[in-house]
Image (cartoon, rainbow, N blue to C red):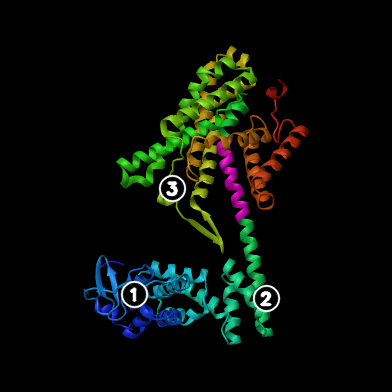
Amino acid sequence: MTGLITAVVLSVGLDAGTLEKIARGNQAERQGAISTLAAAGDAAAVPVLRATLEGRLYAGAEGPVLIDDGGTLRDALTGAPAAPPDDLEKVVINNRLRRTLEGALVVLSLSAPGRAERLDAVRALQRTPDPDVLPAVESALAKEKDKEVREALITTEAMLALSAPEAARRTAAAQQLRRVPGATSKRLLTQRLAVERDPAVLAALKEASESVEASLKRAEMVGLLFSGLSLGSVLLLAALGLAVTFGLMGVINMAHGELLMIGAYATWLVQTLFRRYLPGHFGWYLAVAVPASFLAAAAVGALLELTVVRKLYGRPLETLLATFGASLLLMQAVRSAFGAQNVEVANPDWMSGGITVLAGLVLPFNRIAILLFGSFVLLLVWVLLSRTRLGLWVRAVTQNRQRAAGLGVAAPRIDLLAFALGSGIAGLGGCALSQIGNVGPELGQGFIVDSFMVVVLGGVGQLAGTITAAAGLGLANKALEPVAGAVLAKIVVLVFIILFIQRRPQGLFALRGRAADD
């Protein structure tokens, strides 16, 4: 704490005797003095307690206790500047006393003028409930006017009242905790069940514990479903571009992951420019980053098609090897331009935080945004391929290249546009991925195999299959991870896909019509 420590503030409730115990007393005296100030809700003691915790409290063998207030020594009681005695030493605390001080400062923050500070203090007490602070919580509840802080205080009071001597109060506390299910409520109820002897209270505790357990299981299931769909949306964005280049064009593009990386780095560059030149509009940088990531990846994809892929159509092995070499070149180019270390892409303010849908379950805004963004991109791709002239030409060239060319379709131009489209969609996937993790040269390597699994499992050339496979793989991975671990879960999923393709080579959704017969 900096600034003038006034005698008016410090003189209320903090006397020379209490200060003497804190500065020069033994362990028990210091603990007792600090706890007494906290239980009394003596906010005037905050500067002394905080100075003690931060190592800014000094005392000699006798005389006044001093606080280092930004380089100036002041009397802890009067706030007046004071000359240090020759034997002045810092008041040293141990870990036990440090924990006592931290707890006391949290309790005293219940009377802080700021609403946010009071709410943080209540939540800190909920994480580590101490029955000794129940009087301070009751006192704060009697004075609190803010609705949200009052509700949090009522819950905290119930957590602390589980150890109250009155059976009726313990029963009421159990019923209150039943209405606020969470990990802390479950732990406290379980602990109280182990020592409770009153039959009526035991029944209330068991009922509350079972209700909290059921609520937590529901939250876990909803969280698992959301995590699976969230991972599925990421896989969908990563695989959607591949569904065009591989599914519709038949090109095995091993550089697809690096196109994701290009989109992520384009997002990072736009963010950097906004921070430097438009800091007041930083929250809008994604509006520029989305088209920039699409165009950057589409340009790289078009260059790749013109220089490598175009010469190798119909030769899948050579295409695979050539695009693998291109992926290595792209990674090295990014390392040379931006360094080998990961770069951080920050979420805009509106994507920070989350929404609480159930007790103990918070859905992050950035994951929700990616889920909606993936759905929007999917809709645009479907409209483009099924409702536009370009989509008609792409489908015509895919089904019968020679016949389409005979009808006047410029097949090489359509190849270029389709490959650029698939690459641009991969860039959008990279833009989305940048919002949930760091961006580095190896970003795409973690998604190339998963992307091919999604396309192959869903059915080559089938957008509906890509959606189903992405959601299914996302849910399967998240369902298996708690049981088998992340690595083993991926292995199990891969083995399943191999066995499934052995039985159904066309994937979940088979092509129909002439394309299926060729």
- Which residue is located at x 60 percent, y 77 percent? 174
Query: Please, is residue 217 above or below residue 378 in the view?
Result: below
Distance, label 2 to label 1, CA atoms, is 44 Å
Q: Nearer the viewer, residue 425 or 492?
A: 492
Secondary structure beneath dot 3 equals: loop
Q: Position of residue 73 (x, y in %)?
A: 25, 71
Lateral position of residue 350 relative to residue 475, left or right: left
Lateral position of residue 236 relative to residue 505, left or right: left
Q: Which picture quadrant has residue 503? A: top right
* Residue at mark 3: 347
Q: Which of 463 and 71 is in front in this view?
A: 71
* Residue at mark 2: 206
Q: Position of residue 29 (x, y in %)?
A: 43, 82
Query: Please, is residue 361 above or below residue 292 in the view?
Result: below
Residue type at mark 3 is Asn
Q: Which of 245 and 322 is in front in this view?
A: 322
> From which residue to which does the magenta span run?
223-239
Lateral position of residue 513 relative to residue 312, left or right: right
Residue 226 is covered by the magenta coloring? yes
| Label 3 with label 2: CB-CB less than 8 Å | no
